[in-house]
Every structure is written in structure tokens, then in C-alpha cells.
Image (cartoon, rainbow, N blue to C red):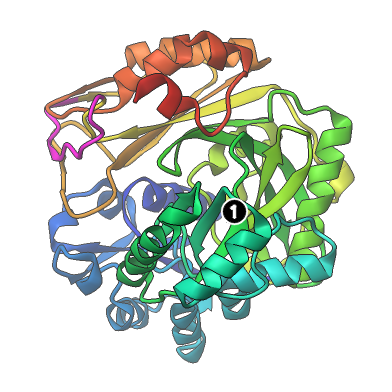
């Protein structure tokens, strides 16, 4: 296996910095691409080379496939890492890389297409013997079909965009009288967000945990999992806090959900890093939700308890290496929690871009901060509001919570509003401390 000499990072913010660091530890030179508004970002400063790919709007820069491919050609980059978001799950981008003889550090275009089509993914899982929530066998394009299926499944049901993610194009329907209106709303949002109005429907499981499994798969059929993460603390289907492992996981549960994750990856003939997401119902049953064909925002909590650098593994797998680990090699140590620090009003959750007059991240034992922010940087209004990921590790969950409280108290960001005060409230909430929460925790306690 011969590693790449140079990798281009087709992203921005903290994930671009994270990838640059992994590349440098592997002895790989890096190229940062940036929009005009991102000229003074940390990624640009840390990369070996940097090249402007367009104006601030993402569709003219970070989503501009010809500009990114040209940047790779100009700089002689052998591979491109997409990070998450933007083009990370765009199969056309993967094909453009292949056509230009550039290695895409991630799964195949076929993997991305299958994972992105939620209805197709359900079919693959059923064939693979992975349990799925009762729902549609194929996509739904009209309201009459939606009504017929909802009556068969039984209310409540949830409508989801087949090509969607991140909570877009999703509506919960509690009774038949609301179905037509909500179907059209979800379909319209799906079209606007993904250019695809196809929907699918599932039985809505109201009381649930959101548990996901981190997968690593090489190009030789070897697949392992790195344990599970609890991502149940969400607002409007957007994750806010993640932790690993699941607080109530025993060996039997981890074996069960881990094997289901591996079975899912095999069903997709998956390669590289990926995440299989599951619903954990109150009765203890697990159901396949979706597969994310990219690195996850919350990957650091898994790294903290396994001591495995997932980004490095992605790069080595893409370069042709076999997995360095067998399943029996994976050991779990302690507990890790991640808080997503967003440039948002902590009460209204509205964006708060602007100039950071002071940025002092916390430190000390067991504290990690993944960020591209610094004193003097201006948070642009054009992109996602995530500015830092605060990650802690403790001997157990209790110590991790105490350490997170301390780190949040130390974290100083002035000039803009952030979600730090909101996270401090959650870390003090008795139900969170007990692990007694599900995906409705935020709406029931803070809305």
C-alpha cells in the first residue's frame, strides 16, 4: 500500500482542519479549497497549499464540482477527501473524481446512491435480514397512494424524503385528515432541498432512542464495527449531543446492534467508513433507519473510546490498505460525550454570525476541541452554524458529564451568541444525568 503524496480537502470549517491534521500525521501534503469569504480560515492557514474556488455562495464554491476538480488538477492532488455535508454524499462528484483519475476518499458512487435512496436502502436491508420499521416497499409519488398505505400501516406514520437527510422533507402524521396537507408540505420541502420529491412512509415510533454504529470496511471484504453512539438528544431531527457508548449497552446489546450494522454494510457491499443508524424502540427492538455514507460529525466520541483515528483509516483504505484491525482487536475504554457548539442564539436557535472578539477553548485532561474558530475570525452567514465540537472523555459516564460541565464553563466565546449556555442546562438536567431520555427530550423540556 502506497499512501497519497497530496490530498485536497473539499470542505471547510472544523472538518477541514480535522482532515488536514490527519494527513499531516500520515506525512501527506494537503490542499485547502476556500470561498472568497473563507480566505482567512484556519484550514487555509494550516494547509500546505490553498486555492480559491469561487464566491461565498456554496453552489458557486463548495458545491462547484468543476472548480474543485480543477483545483485538484492544478495542484496535482491525487485524492480528495469530502468531509461531511456539501459533496460528501454526491455520487456524481465521485464519478467526476474517477473520470479525472483522482481517488475519492470515501465509499463508491454505487454505495452513495443506494444509501441516499432511503426506499432502496430499506429494500436492501430486508433482503439482508436487517430489521426495518414497517413501511412502504417503494417510493410514494401521490397523495392517494399515501392515504392507502397509511391506513394499512396504521397512524401515526412518518413521511420521509427518499433522497433526504438532516430532517428535511420529513413530517409526522397523527391522523388521516392531516395526511394530504403534510404530504404536500414534505414533498415540496424535499424538492427544494434535494431536487427529488419522492417520499416513503414508515410507522412512526414515538418513543425511541437514536443509536448508530460506526463501520469500517476495506476493499477486500473485511468489515468491523467500532461500537455504538447514542444520538438521541436532537432538536427538529438535528443532533445536538452525542455520546459513546450507549449508557445502557451491555455486551449482548453491543454484539446485537454491531452485528446488525455489519450485516447492513455487507448488504450494501460497502467500503470505507460509514454509519448505520438504528431506532431503538421502548420494547428493546432495533430497526434500521438509514446508512450515512460519509464521516459523521460525531465521529470523535468513537475515537475517544477506541483510540482509533477514523479519518486516517479512511485515507488508508482509499489508498488500498487492508483493515489494520479484526473485530476482536476493538476494545472500549470509558465514556465520551460531544456537544456541538453552534453560532446560534441559545434560546431561539436562530443563527448568530459575526466577528469573534475573544475565543478561548477549554483544555485539561480528557478534553478535545475540534474547531476552525479563533479570536478575530468572522463567522460567515453563508454556511452551517457549527463552529466547534467540544468532546470529553472520562472513566465512566458520570465523570464524562462532570468534565463536560467544567469544559463548558471554561469555554469563552465573545462577540457572537453560541449554544454553550444551552448545553450547560442539559448537563445539569436530572433526566440527562440518569440517561432517561429519548429523541423528544428537547421538545419536552426546552420548547
Front residue of this view, candidates 180 and 404: 180
Outermost residue, bottom direction? Answer: 99
Quadrant location of residue 72? bottom left
Quadrant holding the C terminus: top left
Res 96 visible: yes
- The total number of labels drawn is 1
Residue 385 spot, x, y in % from top left: 27, 43
Side of 386 where 399 appears, left or right: right
* Residue 351: quadrant of the picture: top left
The residue shown at (44%, 24%) is: 444
Judged left or right of residue 78, residue 134 is right
- Does 350 appear above or below 27? above
- Quarter holding the N terminus is bottom right
Tell me the residue that label 1 is attached to: 312
Q: Residue 375: percent from the left, percent from the top?
A: 18, 31
Is residue 106 in sight in this rendering? no
> Residue shown at 12%/27% (left/top)?
415
- Residue 372: x %, y % from top left: 30, 42
What secondary structure is found at the residue carrying circle 1? Answer: helix
Residue 20 drawn above or below residue 254:
below
- Residue at 70%, 22% (x, y): give it: 334
Queried whether the magenta region covers residue 20, the answer comes back as: no
> Is the stretch drawn in magenta largely helix, strand or loop?
loop
- Depth check: give the residue in front, 425 or 438: 438
Tell me where the magenta segment starts and ends, as one range: 347-358
Residue 75, image x, y percentages: 34, 76
Residue count near mark 1 (Cα–Cα under 10 Å), binned few <14, some 14–19, many ≥20:
some
The question of residue 352 being in magenta is answered with yes
Residue drawn where x is 38% and y is 15% of the image: 424
Residue 37's quadrant in the figure?
Answer: bottom left
Residue sticking out furthest to the front:
177
Amino acid at each position: 500500500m502506497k499512501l497519497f503524496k497530496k490530498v485536497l480537502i473539499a470542505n471547510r470549517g472544523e472538518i477541514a482542519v480535522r482532515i488536514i491534521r490527519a494527513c499531516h500525521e500520515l506525512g501527506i501534503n494537503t490542499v485547502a479549497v476556500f470561498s472568497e469569504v473563507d480566505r482567512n480560515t484556519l484550514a487555509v492557514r494550516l494547509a500546505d497549499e490553498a486555492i480559491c474556488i469561487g464566491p461565498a455562495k456554496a453552489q458557486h464554491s463548495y458545491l462547484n464540482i468543476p472548480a474543485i476538480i480543477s483545483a485538484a488538477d492544478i495542484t496535482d492532488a491525487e485524492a480528495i477527501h469530502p468531509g461531511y455535508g456539501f459533496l460528501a454524499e454526491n455520487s456524481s462528484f465521485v464519478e467526476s473524481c474517477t473520470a479525472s483519475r483522482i481517488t475519492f476518499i470515501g465509499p463508491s458512487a454505487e454505495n452513495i446512491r443506494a444509501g441516499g435512496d432511503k426506499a432502496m436502502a430499506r429494500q436492501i436491508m430486508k433482503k439482508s435480514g436487517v430489521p426495518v420499521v414497517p413501511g412502504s416497499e417503494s417510493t410514494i409519488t401521490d397523495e392517494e397512494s399515501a392515504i392507502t398505505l397509511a391506513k394499512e400501516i396504521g397512524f401515526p406514520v412518518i413521511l420521509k424524503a427518499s433522497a433526504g437527510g438532516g430532517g428535511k422533507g420529513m413530517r409526522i402524521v397523527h391522523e388521516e385528515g392531516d395526511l394530504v396537507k403534510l404530504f404536500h408540505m414534505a414533498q415540496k420541502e424535499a424538492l427544494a432541498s434535494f431536487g427529488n420529491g419522492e417520499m416513503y412512509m414508515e410507522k412512526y415510533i414515538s418513543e425511541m432512542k437514536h443509536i448508530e454504529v460506526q463501520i469500517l470496511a476495506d476493499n477486500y471484504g473485511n468489515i468491523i464495527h467500532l461500537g455504538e453512539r447514542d444520538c438521541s438528544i436532537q432538536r427538529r431531527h438535528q443532533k445536538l449531543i452525542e455520546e459513546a457508548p450507549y449508557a445502557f449497552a451491555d455486551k449482548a446489546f453491543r454484539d446485537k446492534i454491531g452485528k446488525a450494522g455489519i450485516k447492513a454494510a455487507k448488504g450494501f457491499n460497502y467500503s470505507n467508513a460509514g454509519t448505520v443508524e438504528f431506532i431503538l424502540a421502548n420494547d428493546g427492538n432495533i430497526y434500521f433507519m438509514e446508512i450515512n455514507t460519509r464521516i459523521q460529525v460525531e465521529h470523535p466520541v468513537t475515537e475517544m473510546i477506541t483510540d482509533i483515528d477514523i479519518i486516517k483509516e479512511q485515507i488508508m483504505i482509499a489508498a488500498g490498505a487492508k483493515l489494520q484491525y479484526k473485530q476482536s482487536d476493538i476494545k472500549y475504554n470509558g465514556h465520551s460525550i460531544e456537544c456541538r457548539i453552534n453560532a446560534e442564539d441559545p434560546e431561539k436557535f436562530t443563527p448568530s454570525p459575526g466577528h469573534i472578539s475573544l475565543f478561548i477553548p477549554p483544555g485539561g485532561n480528557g478534553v478535545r476541541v475540534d474547531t476552525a474558530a479563533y479570536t478575530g475570525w468572522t463567522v460567515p452567514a453563508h454556511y452551517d452554524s457549527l463552529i466547534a465540537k467540544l468532546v470529553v472523555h472520562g472513566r465512566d459516564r458520570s465523570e464524562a458529564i462532570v468534565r463536560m460541565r467544567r469544559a463548558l464553563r471554561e469555554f469563552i466565546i465573545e462577540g457572537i451568541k453560541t449554544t454553550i449556555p444551552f448545553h450547560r442546562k442539559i448537563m445539569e438536567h436530572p433526566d440527562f444525568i440518569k440517561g432517561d431520555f429519548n429523541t423528544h427530550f428537547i421538545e419536552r423540556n426546552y420548547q
